[in-house]
Image (cartoon, rainbow, N blue to C red):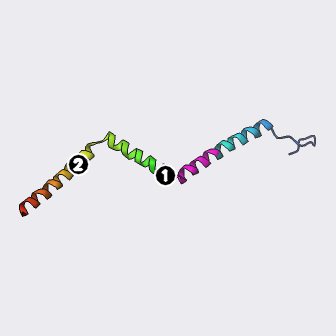
Amino acid sequence: MSESNGTTAKPDLVALRAEIKQTRAELGDTVQALAARTDVKARAREQVVQVRERVRVNQTPLVLVAAGLAAVVGVILIVRGRRR
């Protein structure tokens, strides 16, 4: 860049440093996001935590599954008892 008097204008150092700082922060966030996506164990653990939380919050399906399982076991025992 040249000014009207023929000298080269110096870039604003404060603005450049601010831009560099912003770029580094964005790059750091990007690297962290990519690292999180490639950490399979951590993602699996997070899924387990989410499922456990859903079961704690809504235990009705768990009770229904247990009742269904008990009914199936009861039917099996009754059928076996009649065969003997």
Q: Give neighbour class at mark 2: few <14, some 14-19, many 20+ (Cα, 10 Å).
A: few
Residue sitting nearer the eye, 38 or 25 = 38
For this view, does 37 lie left or right of residue 82? right
For this view, does 73 lie left or right of residue 5? left
Q: Residue furthest front?
A: 84
* Number of on-image labels: 2
Which residue sits at x=26%, y=43%? 60
The residue carrying mark 2 is 66
Quick check: marks 2 and 1 in contact, CB under 8 Å? no
Q: CA distance from mark 2 to mark 1?
A: 30 Å
Is residue 35 on the magenta stretch?
yes
Q: Amino acid at mark 2?
A: Ala
Q: Give neighbour class at mark 1: few <14, some 14-19, many 20+ (Cα, 10 Å).
A: few
Residue 11 rendering spot, x and y as whole percentages: 82, 41
Q: What element does badge 2 sit on?
A: helix
Residue sitting nearer the eye, 18 or 29 = 29
* Mark 2 vs 1, N-terminal side: 1
Residue sitting nearer the eye, 79 or 53 = 79
Q: Amino acid at mark 1?
A: Lys
For this view, does 19 lie left or right of residue 61? right
- The dominant secondary structure in magenta is helix
- Which of the numbered marks, if any, corresponds to residue 41? 1
Q: Residue furthest top?
A: 14
Which residue sits at x=11%, y=61%? 80
Q: Quadrant of the N terminus?
A: top right
Chain part drawn in magenta? 28-42
Q: Quadrant of the C terminus?
A: bottom left
Which of the 4 image quadrants contains residue 4?
top right
